[in-house]
Image (tube, rainbow, N blue to C red):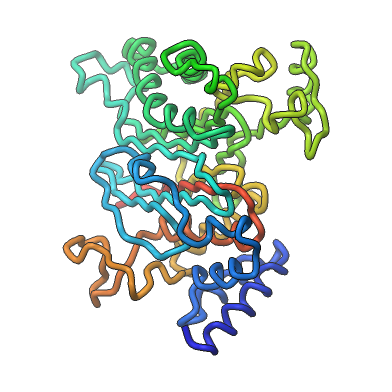
Amino acid sequence: MTMAAAGAASALFRWFSKMVEDDEVGACQKTMSLGSVSCGEAMEQAGRRMSPSCCSGLSCEFSATEEAESAGSDGAEHEEVPRGVVDRRRNEAAAGWRLKYGVVSIIGRRREMEDAVAVQKRFVKSLTERGRSSGGGVGDYDFFAVFDGHGGSNVARFCRERLHEVVAEEVAASAGGRVVNWEQVMAGSFGKVDEEVNCGEMATDKMKTIGSTAVVAVVGEEEVVVANCGDSRAVICRSGVAVALSTDHKPNRPDERERVEAAGGRVINWNGFRVLGVLATSRSIGDHYLKPFIISEPEVAVCERTSKDEFLILASDGLWDVITNEVACQVTRQCLYGRLKRRSLDKDSNPDPNSPSSQDKLGNATVSRATEAAASLAELAIARGSKDNISVVVIELRRRK
Protein backbone atom coordinates (compact mmCIF):
# COMPACT_ATOMS: atom_id res chain seq x y z
CA MET A 1 0.00 0.00 0.00
CA THR A 2 1.35 3.40 -0.97
CA MET A 3 2.14 6.17 1.51
CA ALA A 4 -0.91 8.10 0.34
CA ALA A 5 -3.15 5.06 0.73
CA ALA A 6 -1.77 4.36 4.19
CA GLY A 7 -2.41 7.95 5.21
CA ALA A 8 -5.95 7.75 3.86
CA ALA A 9 -6.59 4.52 5.73
CA SER A 10 -5.26 6.03 8.96
CA ALA A 11 -7.47 9.08 8.56
CA LEU A 12 -10.40 6.82 7.73
CA PHE A 13 -10.07 4.86 10.96
CA ARG A 14 -9.85 8.00 13.10
CA TRP A 15 -12.89 9.42 11.36
CA PHE A 16 -14.77 6.10 11.51
CA SER A 17 -14.22 5.82 15.26
CA LYS A 18 -15.73 9.26 15.92
CA MET A 19 -18.92 8.70 13.94
CA VAL A 20 -22.24 9.19 15.64
CA GLU A 21 -25.15 6.92 14.89
CA ASP A 22 -27.18 9.56 13.05
CA ASP A 23 -24.72 9.73 10.16
CA GLU A 24 -23.12 6.28 10.27
CA VAL A 25 -24.70 5.11 7.03
CA GLY A 26 -23.46 8.10 5.10
CA ALA A 27 -20.06 7.65 6.68
CA CYS A 28 -19.99 4.01 5.63
CA GLN A 29 -20.90 4.94 2.08
CA LYS A 30 -18.02 7.43 1.90
CA THR A 31 -15.69 4.86 3.42
CA MET A 32 -16.54 2.15 0.91
CA SER A 33 -15.89 4.48 -2.05
CA LEU A 34 -12.32 5.46 -1.14
CA GLY A 35 -10.95 3.60 -4.14
CA SER A 36 -7.70 1.85 -3.29
CA VAL A 37 -8.29 1.90 0.47
CA SER A 38 -10.67 -0.81 1.67
CA CYS A 39 -12.25 -1.18 5.10
CA GLY A 40 -10.06 -4.24 5.59
CA GLU A 41 -6.96 -2.10 5.10
CA ALA A 42 -8.34 0.47 7.51
CA MET A 43 -8.81 -2.26 10.09
CA GLU A 44 -5.21 -3.39 9.62
CA GLN A 45 -4.12 0.20 10.23
CA ALA A 46 -6.20 0.18 13.39
CA GLY A 47 -4.69 -3.12 14.49
CA ARG A 48 -1.17 -1.74 14.26
CA ARG A 49 -2.10 0.91 16.85
CA MET A 50 -3.30 -1.64 19.37
CA SER A 51 -1.48 -3.94 21.72
CA PRO A 52 -0.81 -7.49 20.43
CA SER A 53 -3.37 -8.96 22.81
CA CYS A 54 -6.00 -6.54 21.58
CA CYS A 55 -5.58 -6.99 17.83
CA SER A 56 -4.79 -10.69 17.52
CA GLY A 57 -8.05 -11.35 15.69
CA LEU A 58 -7.38 -8.58 13.19
CA SER A 59 -4.33 -10.18 11.69
CA CYS A 60 -4.82 -13.81 10.74
CA GLU A 61 -5.97 -15.64 13.87
CA PHE A 62 -9.18 -17.11 12.61
CA SER A 63 -11.09 -20.12 13.86
CA ALA A 64 -9.93 -23.65 13.10
CA THR A 65 -10.54 -25.20 9.70
CA GLU A 66 -13.52 -27.18 10.94
CA GLU A 67 -15.25 -23.89 11.77
CA ALA A 68 -15.48 -23.23 8.05
CA GLU A 69 -17.99 -26.05 7.82
CA SER A 70 -20.29 -24.63 10.50
CA ALA A 71 -22.90 -23.47 8.02
CA GLY A 72 -23.62 -27.05 6.99
CA SER A 73 -22.83 -29.01 3.84
CA ASP A 74 -25.60 -27.86 1.54
CA GLY A 75 -23.38 -27.14 -1.45
CA ALA A 76 -22.99 -23.37 -1.06
CA GLU A 77 -19.81 -21.98 -2.57
CA HIS A 78 -16.83 -20.85 -0.52
CA GLU A 79 -14.41 -18.09 -1.53
CA GLU A 80 -10.95 -17.09 -0.37
CA VAL A 81 -11.38 -13.74 1.34
CA PRO A 82 -9.23 -10.77 2.40
CA ARG A 83 -6.84 -11.10 5.30
CA GLY A 84 -8.17 -9.61 8.53
CA VAL A 85 -11.76 -9.23 7.35
CA VAL A 86 -13.79 -12.43 7.33
CA ASP A 87 -13.05 -16.10 7.75
CA ARG A 88 -16.20 -17.53 6.23
CA ARG A 89 -18.73 -16.39 3.65
CA ARG A 90 -21.83 -17.98 2.26
CA ASN A 91 -24.35 -17.27 -0.45
CA GLU A 92 -27.01 -19.43 -2.02
CA ALA A 93 -30.34 -19.08 -3.81
CA ALA A 94 -32.97 -21.59 -2.74
CA ALA A 95 -35.31 -23.23 -5.18
CA GLY A 96 -38.90 -22.07 -5.36
CA TRP A 97 -39.00 -18.78 -3.52
CA ARG A 98 -35.22 -18.39 -3.85
CA LEU A 99 -34.18 -17.30 -0.39
CA LYS A 100 -30.78 -15.59 -0.39
CA TYR A 101 -28.48 -15.08 2.57
CA GLY A 102 -24.96 -14.11 3.58
CA VAL A 103 -22.87 -15.23 6.56
CA VAL A 104 -19.77 -13.70 8.13
CA SER A 105 -18.10 -14.94 11.31
CA ILE A 106 -14.83 -13.50 12.62
CA ILE A 107 -12.69 -13.90 15.71
CA GLY A 108 -12.35 -10.14 16.12
CA ARG A 109 -10.09 -9.05 18.96
CA ARG A 110 -10.53 -12.25 20.96
CA ARG A 111 -7.79 -14.85 21.27
CA GLU A 112 -10.20 -17.75 20.69
CA MET A 113 -13.17 -18.29 18.39
CA GLU A 114 -16.19 -19.34 20.45
CA ASP A 115 -18.98 -18.39 18.02
CA ALA A 116 -20.58 -20.89 15.66
CA VAL A 117 -23.06 -20.44 12.82
CA ALA A 118 -25.48 -22.96 11.33
CA VAL A 119 -27.35 -22.84 8.03
CA GLN A 120 -29.48 -25.78 6.92
CA LYS A 121 -31.55 -25.41 3.77
CA ARG A 122 -34.92 -27.18 3.73
CA PHE A 123 -34.16 -28.83 7.05
CA VAL A 124 -37.90 -29.41 7.42
CA LYS A 125 -39.44 -30.57 4.16
CA SER A 126 -43.14 -30.50 3.41
CA LEU A 127 -45.22 -33.25 4.94
CA THR A 128 -46.59 -34.00 1.49
CA GLU A 129 -43.09 -34.98 0.30
CA ARG A 130 -42.82 -37.43 3.20
CA GLY A 131 -46.07 -39.09 2.24
CA ARG A 132 -48.15 -37.48 4.95
CA SER A 133 -51.30 -35.47 4.65
CA SER A 134 -50.58 -31.74 4.43
CA GLY A 135 -53.30 -30.04 6.42
CA GLY A 136 -51.57 -26.72 5.79
CA GLY A 137 -48.95 -25.16 7.96
CA VAL A 138 -45.90 -27.36 7.37
CA GLY A 139 -44.03 -26.66 4.17
CA ASP A 140 -40.34 -26.23 3.44
CA TYR A 141 -38.32 -24.37 6.05
CA ASP A 142 -34.73 -23.17 6.24
CA PHE A 143 -32.79 -23.06 9.50
CA PHE A 144 -30.39 -20.27 10.49
CA ALA A 145 -28.69 -19.90 13.86
CA VAL A 146 -25.94 -18.02 15.66
CA PHE A 147 -24.38 -19.57 18.76
CA ASP A 148 -22.16 -17.49 21.06
CA GLY A 149 -20.14 -19.74 23.31
CA HIS A 150 -18.53 -18.83 26.63
CA GLY A 151 -15.94 -20.75 28.64
CA GLY A 152 -15.02 -22.52 25.40
CA SER A 153 -16.45 -23.37 21.99
CA ASN A 154 -17.58 -26.95 22.72
CA VAL A 155 -21.24 -26.25 23.42
CA ALA A 156 -21.62 -23.78 20.55
CA ARG A 157 -20.17 -26.35 18.14
CA PHE A 158 -22.40 -29.09 19.50
CA CYS A 159 -25.47 -26.88 19.04
CA ARG A 160 -24.36 -26.08 15.51
CA GLU A 161 -24.33 -29.79 14.64
CA ARG A 162 -27.33 -30.93 16.66
CA LEU A 163 -30.02 -28.31 17.25
CA HIS A 164 -31.50 -28.28 13.73
CA GLU A 165 -31.82 -32.07 13.87
CA VAL A 166 -33.73 -31.94 17.13
CA VAL A 167 -36.03 -29.17 15.87
CA ALA A 168 -36.82 -31.23 12.75
CA GLU A 169 -37.58 -34.25 14.94
CA GLU A 170 -39.86 -32.21 17.18
CA VAL A 171 -41.74 -30.80 14.17
CA ALA A 172 -42.23 -34.26 12.70
CA ALA A 173 -43.46 -35.59 16.03
CA SER A 174 -45.84 -32.74 16.85
CA ALA A 175 -47.20 -31.46 13.53
CA GLY A 176 -49.48 -34.33 12.60
CA GLY A 177 -50.18 -32.64 9.28
CA ARG A 178 -51.46 -29.50 10.96
CA VAL A 179 -50.11 -26.13 12.03
CA VAL A 180 -46.98 -26.49 14.15
CA ASN A 181 -46.96 -25.22 17.72
CA TRP A 182 -43.58 -23.52 17.33
CA GLU A 183 -43.34 -22.37 20.93
CA GLN A 184 -43.70 -25.95 22.12
CA VAL A 185 -41.33 -27.25 19.44
CA MET A 186 -38.59 -24.75 20.26
CA ALA A 187 -38.91 -25.14 24.02
CA GLY A 188 -38.68 -28.91 23.66
CA SER A 189 -35.74 -28.73 21.26
CA PHE A 190 -33.66 -26.32 23.34
CA GLY A 191 -34.41 -28.34 26.47
CA LYS A 192 -33.41 -31.62 24.81
CA VAL A 193 -30.10 -30.23 23.52
CA ASP A 194 -29.41 -28.70 26.94
CA GLU A 195 -30.02 -32.09 28.54
CA GLU A 196 -27.70 -33.80 26.05
CA VAL A 197 -24.97 -31.28 26.88
CA ASN A 198 -25.41 -31.54 30.65
CA CYS A 199 -26.27 -35.22 31.04
CA GLY A 200 -25.14 -37.01 27.87
CA GLU A 201 -21.73 -38.13 26.66
CA MET A 202 -20.50 -34.54 26.79
CA ALA A 203 -21.23 -34.20 30.51
CA THR A 204 -17.69 -34.03 31.87
CA ASP A 205 -16.46 -31.84 34.72
CA LYS A 206 -14.90 -29.47 32.19
CA MET A 207 -18.13 -29.16 30.23
CA LYS A 208 -20.05 -28.05 33.32
CA THR A 209 -18.51 -24.58 33.04
CA ILE A 210 -19.10 -24.17 29.29
CA GLY A 211 -22.25 -22.84 27.66
CA SER A 212 -23.64 -21.01 24.66
CA THR A 213 -26.37 -18.58 23.78
CA ALA A 214 -28.54 -19.38 20.76
CA VAL A 215 -30.68 -17.34 18.43
CA VAL A 216 -32.50 -19.38 15.79
CA ALA A 217 -34.58 -18.34 12.80
CA VAL A 218 -36.72 -20.86 10.96
CA VAL A 219 -37.82 -19.25 7.72
CA GLY A 220 -40.70 -20.63 5.68
CA GLU A 221 -42.47 -19.26 2.65
CA GLU A 222 -45.30 -17.91 4.78
CA GLU A 223 -43.78 -17.30 8.22
CA VAL A 224 -40.64 -16.55 10.21
CA VAL A 225 -40.06 -18.21 13.56
CA VAL A 226 -37.41 -16.83 15.94
CA ALA A 227 -36.31 -18.53 19.14
CA ASN A 228 -33.79 -16.85 21.43
CA CYS A 229 -31.94 -18.01 24.51
CA GLY A 230 -29.32 -15.51 25.69
CA ASP A 231 -28.04 -12.18 24.42
CA SER A 232 -27.63 -12.79 20.70
CA ARG A 233 -30.40 -11.07 18.74
CA ALA A 234 -32.73 -11.24 15.74
CA VAL A 235 -33.91 -8.05 14.01
CA ILE A 236 -36.24 -7.84 11.02
CA CYS A 237 -36.52 -4.82 8.72
CA ARG A 238 -40.07 -3.94 7.65
CA SER A 239 -40.52 -1.08 5.23
CA GLY A 240 -37.26 0.42 6.44
CA VAL A 241 -38.12 0.10 10.14
CA ALA A 242 -36.02 -2.07 12.48
CA VAL A 243 -38.14 -4.44 14.56
CA ALA A 244 -36.51 -6.63 17.22
CA LEU A 245 -37.88 -10.19 17.15
CA SER A 246 -36.01 -11.12 20.32
CA THR A 247 -35.21 -9.51 23.64
CA ASP A 248 -31.77 -10.00 25.18
CA HIS A 249 -31.69 -12.15 28.29
CA LYS A 250 -29.57 -9.93 30.50
CA PRO A 251 -29.35 -10.52 34.27
CA ASN A 252 -30.46 -6.95 35.00
CA ARG A 253 -33.65 -7.29 32.92
CA PRO A 254 -36.32 -6.92 35.62
CA ASP A 255 -38.20 -10.16 34.89
CA GLU A 256 -34.99 -12.15 34.49
CA ARG A 257 -33.55 -10.77 37.72
CA GLU A 258 -36.76 -11.67 39.54
CA ARG A 259 -36.64 -15.22 38.13
CA VAL A 260 -32.98 -15.71 39.11
CA GLU A 261 -33.57 -14.45 42.65
CA ALA A 262 -36.72 -16.55 43.03
CA ALA A 263 -34.58 -19.61 42.23
CA GLY A 264 -32.18 -18.66 45.02
CA GLY A 265 -29.54 -16.93 42.92
CA ARG A 266 -28.20 -13.40 42.89
CA VAL A 267 -27.40 -10.84 40.24
CA ILE A 268 -24.15 -9.08 41.09
CA ASN A 269 -22.72 -6.02 39.38
CA TRP A 270 -19.17 -7.25 38.84
CA ASN A 271 -17.79 -5.64 35.68
CA GLY A 272 -21.40 -5.55 34.48
CA PHE A 273 -24.44 -7.37 35.80
CA ARG A 274 -23.80 -11.11 36.08
CA VAL A 275 -25.55 -14.15 37.53
CA LEU A 276 -23.66 -14.95 40.75
CA GLY A 277 -21.13 -12.40 39.53
CA VAL A 278 -20.03 -14.85 36.81
CA LEU A 279 -22.21 -15.01 33.69
CA ALA A 280 -23.37 -11.93 31.79
CA THR A 281 -26.44 -13.65 30.33
CA SER A 282 -29.34 -15.15 32.25
CA ARG A 283 -30.23 -17.92 29.77
CA SER A 284 -28.06 -20.32 27.84
CA ILE A 285 -27.58 -23.91 26.74
CA GLY A 286 -25.12 -25.70 29.01
CA ASP A 287 -23.61 -23.98 32.08
CA HIS A 288 -24.57 -26.89 34.30
CA TYR A 289 -22.79 -25.37 37.31
CA LEU A 290 -25.18 -22.39 37.28
CA LYS A 291 -28.43 -24.37 37.26
CA PRO A 292 -31.20 -23.62 38.17
CA PHE A 293 -30.45 -19.90 37.89
CA ILE A 294 -29.51 -20.22 34.22
CA ILE A 295 -32.22 -21.83 32.09
CA SER A 296 -32.33 -22.92 28.44
CA GLU A 297 -35.98 -22.07 27.77
CA PRO A 298 -36.17 -19.80 24.69
CA GLU A 299 -38.54 -16.95 24.02
CA VAL A 300 -40.30 -17.57 20.71
CA ALA A 301 -41.78 -15.16 18.17
CA VAL A 302 -43.83 -16.31 15.17
CA CYS A 303 -44.40 -13.73 12.44
CA GLU A 304 -46.38 -14.04 9.24
CA ARG A 305 -44.32 -12.94 6.26
CA THR A 306 -45.65 -9.92 4.39
CA SER A 307 -44.61 -7.84 1.40
CA LYS A 308 -43.19 -5.28 3.85
CA ASP A 309 -40.54 -7.67 5.14
CA GLU A 310 -37.15 -6.86 3.62
CA PHE A 311 -34.54 -8.88 5.48
CA LEU A 312 -33.65 -10.52 8.78
CA ILE A 313 -30.41 -10.09 10.73
CA LEU A 314 -29.14 -12.63 13.25
CA ALA A 315 -25.97 -11.72 15.13
CA SER A 316 -24.01 -12.34 18.29
CA ASP A 317 -23.53 -9.61 20.87
CA GLY A 318 -20.16 -8.78 19.34
CA LEU A 319 -22.23 -6.78 16.86
CA TRP A 320 -25.11 -5.58 19.05
CA ASP A 321 -22.86 -4.30 21.84
CA VAL A 322 -21.64 -1.50 19.56
CA ILE A 323 -24.31 -1.11 16.84
CA THR A 324 -28.00 -0.36 17.32
CA ASN A 325 -30.80 -2.20 15.56
CA GLU A 326 -31.59 0.90 13.52
CA VAL A 327 -28.04 1.44 12.28
CA ALA A 328 -27.64 -2.26 11.43
CA CYS A 329 -30.79 -2.15 9.31
CA GLN A 330 -29.78 1.09 7.60
CA VAL A 331 -26.36 -0.27 6.64
CA THR A 332 -27.88 -3.55 5.43
CA ARG A 333 -30.49 -1.75 3.31
CA GLN A 334 -27.78 0.34 1.67
CA CYS A 335 -25.86 -2.82 0.77
CA LEU A 336 -28.84 -4.82 -0.47
CA TYR A 337 -30.05 -1.96 -2.67
CA GLY A 338 -26.60 -1.43 -4.14
CA ARG A 339 -26.00 1.99 -2.58
CA LEU A 340 -23.12 0.83 -0.42
CA LYS A 341 -20.27 -1.29 -1.69
CA ARG A 342 -17.05 -2.42 -0.07
CA ARG A 343 -13.91 -3.85 -1.65
CA SER A 344 -14.93 -7.48 -1.17
CA LEU A 345 -11.82 -9.12 -2.51
CA ASP A 346 -8.27 -7.77 -2.63
CA LYS A 347 -6.04 -8.29 -5.66
CA ASP A 348 -4.08 -11.06 -3.96
CA SER A 349 -7.23 -13.09 -3.25
CA ASN A 350 -7.77 -16.18 -5.33
CA PRO A 351 -11.49 -16.95 -5.84
CA ASP A 352 -12.50 -20.02 -7.80
CA PRO A 353 -12.33 -18.89 -11.46
CA ASN A 354 -14.85 -21.57 -12.41
CA SER A 355 -17.46 -20.31 -9.99
CA PRO A 356 -20.08 -18.18 -11.78
CA SER A 357 -21.00 -16.43 -8.55
CA SER A 358 -17.43 -15.26 -7.87
CA GLN A 359 -17.04 -13.10 -10.99
CA ASP A 360 -19.02 -10.41 -12.73
CA LYS A 361 -19.28 -9.90 -16.50
CA LEU A 362 -15.92 -8.13 -16.55
CA GLY A 363 -14.20 -10.93 -14.70
CA ASN A 364 -13.96 -9.01 -11.42
CA ALA A 365 -14.36 -10.89 -8.15
CA THR A 366 -17.74 -10.34 -6.49
CA VAL A 367 -19.84 -11.62 -3.59
CA SER A 368 -23.57 -11.46 -2.99
CA ARG A 369 -25.17 -8.32 -1.61
CA ALA A 370 -26.31 -10.21 1.49
CA THR A 371 -22.71 -11.22 2.16
CA GLU A 372 -21.57 -7.65 1.48
CA ALA A 373 -24.06 -6.49 4.10
CA ALA A 374 -22.92 -9.04 6.69
CA ALA A 375 -19.25 -8.18 6.08
CA SER A 376 -19.94 -4.43 6.27
CA LEU A 377 -21.68 -4.87 9.63
CA ALA A 378 -18.78 -6.92 10.99
CA GLU A 379 -16.24 -4.35 9.83
CA LEU A 380 -18.27 -1.51 11.30
CA ALA A 381 -18.43 -3.34 14.64
CA ILE A 382 -14.64 -3.73 14.60
CA ALA A 383 -14.23 -0.04 13.78
CA ARG A 384 -16.51 0.91 16.66
CA GLY A 385 -14.41 -1.04 19.14
CA SER A 386 -16.10 -4.44 19.50
CA LYS A 387 -13.88 -6.70 21.60
CA ASP A 388 -15.82 -9.93 21.01
CA ASN A 389 -16.20 -12.53 18.30
CA ILE A 390 -18.64 -11.25 15.68
CA SER A 391 -21.05 -13.45 13.74
CA VAL A 392 -23.67 -12.04 11.38
CA VAL A 393 -26.30 -13.70 9.19
CA VAL A 394 -28.29 -11.56 6.74
CA ILE A 395 -31.34 -13.23 5.17
CA GLU A 396 -33.19 -11.54 2.33
CA LEU A 397 -36.95 -11.90 2.67
CA ARG A 398 -38.10 -10.08 -0.47
CA ARG A 399 -39.79 -12.48 -2.82
CA ARG A 400 -38.01 -12.90 -6.14
CA LYS A 401 -39.92 -12.81 -9.43
> In the figure, is residue 188 to the left or right of 55?
left
Vertical side of 99 occupied by 262: above or below: above
- Identify the residue at image location x=58%, y=36%: 245
Vertical side of 31 occupied by 241: above or below: above
- Identify the residue at image location x=44%, y=12%: 200
Vertical side of 144 occupied by 201: above or below: above
Residue 6 x, y percent position in the rendering? 55, 82
Asked whether the viewer can see residue 371, the reply is yes
In front of the other: 183 or 68: 68
> In the figure, is residue 164 to the left or right of 84?
left
> In the figure, is residue 351 to the left or right of 294?
left
- Identify the residue at image location x=55%, y=57%: 56
In front of the other: 206 or 316: 206
In front of the other: 346 or 243: 346
Asked whether the viewer can see residue 308, the reply is no
Residue 324 x, y percent position in the rendering? 66, 51
Q: How many marks?
A: 0
Residue 309 x, y percent position in the rendering? 49, 45
Vertical side of 123 occupied by 205: above or below: above
Residue 316 x, y percent position in the rendering? 56, 42
- Identify the residue at image location x=49%, y=68%: 40
> In the figure, is residue 293 to the left or right of 46?
right
Q: Please tell me in which quadrant of the rendered image residue 291 appears.
A: top right
